[in-house]
Image (cartoon, rainbow, N blue to C red):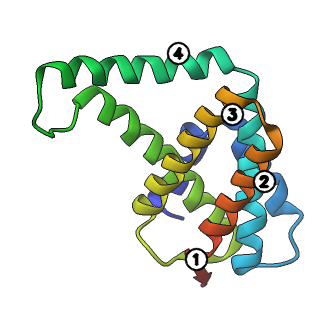
Amino acid sequence: MSVRGEIAEGRLRPTICEAVEKAAASLDITGVRALRVLLHAGVSAYWPVVKATPARQIRAYEVTVQTLRQRWEVQTECIPDPTASAVYREMDTEVAIFLDLCAEKSGAQWLEPVEAIAAYAVSVLQGTVLRWLADCNDETTLVVLDDLVSSLATRAAEV
């Protein structure tokens, strides 16, 4: 088990861990096909949490944008904002833990550094949530999330 895998229960949202564990227990396949199922289970568990808390999601975006606005109003040099960067690093870490958990449970292996894959996933998720907050289009959101799962699965191979 990876170090991140050992702390998954403490860092991942319980609903995501439960969804992945439940899906893993019912699998009769392994490898990338199983990985796709587990990724889908986790993303499917994540989305209702987001939908149930739109005001919280908006506040999180507002805090980030306000932090960045204040920084860029006084600084033109491209230097990471410590507060906003820390928030994104935390999200990257949580997603990396999720990705490692799914890979471990499926018998798959990431072909790229999991940190890079996590940063990509966080970027897609952030844009997807913001778009949904704007248009409330569940159908588009579900298509994007399914495409994210497909894209992530292409970054893995059988162990």
**Three-letter amino acid code at the position of disc 1:** Ala
Q: Earlier in the sequence, mark 1 or mark 2?
A: 2
**Could you tell me which quadrant the N terminus lies in?**
bottom right
Cβ–Cβ under 8 Å for marks 1 and 3? no
**Could you tell me which quadrant the C terminus lies in?**
bottom right
Residue holding disc 1: 156
Q: CA distance from mark 1 to mark 3?
A: 28 Å
Q: CA distance from mark 4 to mark 3?
A: 15 Å
Above-or-below relation of 12 to 61: below
Q: Earlier in the sequence, mark 4 or mark 1?
A: 4
**Three-letter amino acid code at the position of disc 4:** Arg
Between 144 and 94, the one lying in front of the other is 144
Q: CA distance from mark 1 to mark 2?
A: 17 Å
Cβ–Cβ under 8 Å for marks 2 and 4? no
Cβ–Cβ under 8 Å for marks 4 and 1? no
Residue, x 70% and y 59% (percent of image)?
Answer: 39
Q: Secondary structure at mark 4?
A: helix
* Left or right position of 69 against 123: left
Residue, x 45% and y 57% (percent of image)?
Answer: 3
Q: Secondary structure at mark 2?
A: helix
